[in-house]
Amino acid sequence: MAAAGRKRCGAAQLARMVGAAASLALTLVSFFDPPLLEELRLKSFDLLLRQLPAPLAKPPVVIVDIDPRSLARFGQWPWPRSRTAELISRIAAARPKVIGLDIVFAEPDRSSPARLAEEADATAMPAAARDYLNRLPDPDQVLAKTLADSPAPVILGHLFTSRGAVERKTAEPRSGGFLLKDHDPVPFLHQFAAADTNLPLLERAAQGSGFFNIVPDKDAIVRRLPLLISFNGEPNPSLTLAMLRAAEGGAAPVVVESNENGVRTVQVGPHRIPTTRRGEMLVNFSKSAHAEDQVDPVHRLAYLSAADLLDGALTSAELALLRDAYVIVGTSALGLFDLIAVPVSEVFPGVEFHAQALNTILTGSFLHRPEWIRGLELVQLAALGLLLALLLPRTGAAVGGLLTFAAAAGCIVFSVWMLERHRFLVDMVTPVAASLLLFSVLTFINYFVEEKEAQRLRSAFAQYLSPEVVEELVKNQDSVVLTGEERELTILFSDIRSFTSMAERMRPEALCAFLNEYLTPMTAAVMNRRGTVDKFIGDAVMAFWNAPLTTPSHARHACECALAMLNELEALNLSWLKRGLPAIRIGIGIHCGMARVGNMGSQQRFEYTVIGDTVNLASRLEGLTKLYGAEIIVSGAVFDALEPEGQFLFRRVDTVRVVGKSEPVAIYQLLGEREHIVLTEKFLLHNAALALYSSGDFHEAGQLFARLAEQQPEEDKLCKLYIERCRLLAENPPPHWDGITDLRSK
């Protein structure tokens, strides 16, 4: 098994284990739902709701707004009750289905004539004037009469407060009450024991009453409207719920369905409203006239100015909006402090929040967060985390990033689809955050392990390979096998001639310096041609190609290295001769074939090396350079691999059977690169003589070798060797000649 592969396998296994643990930890964190996670989830829901506005109800929900223009026209708030009565009368005349007042009348009208008469100093006001004031109609009674006589049911609003406020009993539903199914919902509801309610006179005259309390989330944004609140241990309806009940005739009870976990639904007539466990409904917003986005009027609730209504300035089309409408009277004026923050706007009229809740109910565009959604989210998070933990360690950073982006995008698309298609609010923040976190953690682990492995490879091969090849090795770790494998390799051995006798004449320190000076350029020649320096055996150099990295044309690189070694040696000899040191000669043997390469040795020490017959034969070829007088001898395998390319010029030397081998090996002398050598008659004469020798014509071969020796004034050991062989074989012809020389020694 490949060491790099094993390391990667171990790294991937570590990353998967860490990823799985992180995934389970994130799922556990999500289960406990910390505040930060909850706030981010709510923000994501807000973003989705802004993009997918709710439709408008038909008949519509209409807001009669006591806006800044109304206050400028009729004076500051509170208005006299008589003016409020007139406003309600004008609304009721348009025949709406129900009128709700987002206003509380907790104190008697300050402008009441009777109250003014009581407060006046008897000496300051004549008795006749006081009698006149007492005969004027009381504004609160005028408003009460208007409420009682209204053809459309009017629902008053009240506010529950903390302890310490004046405690008054709220009005009960006019007909019936609450029908509680399965479990008592009161323990799950928001609890209050005090309230600011309307004057009893007005409570009795109105057709119902409901609270307009709101409950902001931890980030101060209002998303939920309590439909029920527990007051002194009894459930009480919201203004929205009371209006809905009155619009349905006021006779049907409010059905509250609960289980052991809390409230599930609240139903009024045909309207079945899903709630949170505390009896709150999630408000689905349409476009608001007061929101920053002023486009898309199709989704915008209708606003009518109270000033226009009182002045009779509404158009017929605007008046037609009130017919069968659900009308809520309130204020959007900044100074009256009825502004809140909601998902679609940071400054939003409280009256419209109740209108939006009513519109949500009437259109049935409910937002759902049922109990099983949390289970779905936890399963989704765990499955996504485990999937990424399994896949990310198998990929690189780029592919892993795309995979993470796809997973996060899938979670977002799923959440959008669930909201748009089914109105389910499904968390997308947690899985997206988990995906990014897992990607970051696993990428860091992969980087750390890969960097550690890269450092190990650099350390292991810095002495064998050139820096460029080492970096290439680091980049291609998957292709590296360190534990041993069979590969086709080219092996090179080089050795200094007569080194032993030379070493005997030199002092040890001088010999070490001499060897270092020689081995340095020899090593560079190997490394610069993508070779691996296996070892130094005294003065000998062993190198190989095509491991640890796959190297195409590895035989060519080895031959180029051998020629470079001879060139380097020539320069060294010139330098040594000038310094009075001996010149040397070297022999180089090259063979290519299958061998086993990898880390080998003992448990205490091992090295990256090569073993096999290919290595042994390369070593034998280096030894044959002495016998045949050639500086570089290559095997027939190297010749066969390179001869078709035509880059090098080879001279056939012999066909030999080395000691311990039964198969013969053709051997060749590497003369150099073909472009640098001019073919002469001597080369052709040598080939002809060798062909005669191989065929068994020793006499003719000997004569050609003799002619060749005469043409070469320099010593040619190969010619002399063959002249002597031809003489001996001619005198004693072998019985079965096959042209193969059996070598008797290594």
Image: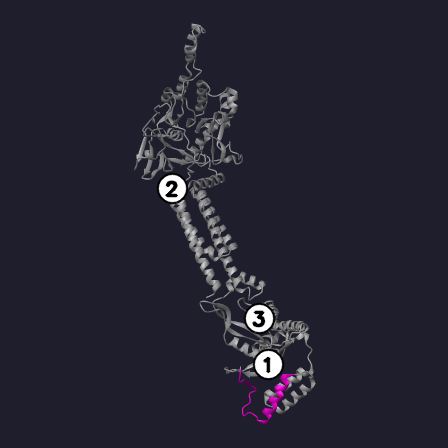
Sequence-earlier tag: 3 or 2: 2
- Mark 1 → mark 3, Cα distance in angstroms: 25 Å
Residue at 48% in and 38% down: 53
**Residue 656 percent coordinates (x, y):** 55, 83
Residue 291 lies within the magenta run = no
The residue tagged 2 is 370
The amino acid type, in three-letter code, at marker 3 is His
Side (left or right) of 251 relative to 299: left
Q: Do the numbered discs 1 and 2 sit on residues whose CB atoms are within 8 Å?
A: no
Mark yes or no: residue 287 visible: no
Near-viewer residue (213 or 512) = 512
Q: Which residues are magenta?
A: 716-745
Instruction: Identify the disc placed on residue 554.
Output: 3
The residue sitting at the bottom extreme is 731
Q: Mark 1: which secondary structure?
A: helix
The amino acid type, in three-letter code, at marker 1 is Lys
The residue tagged 1 is 626
Sequence-earlier tag: 1 or 2: 2
Point out the frontmost of discs 1 and 2: 1
**Residue 14 percent coordinates (x, y):** 44, 56
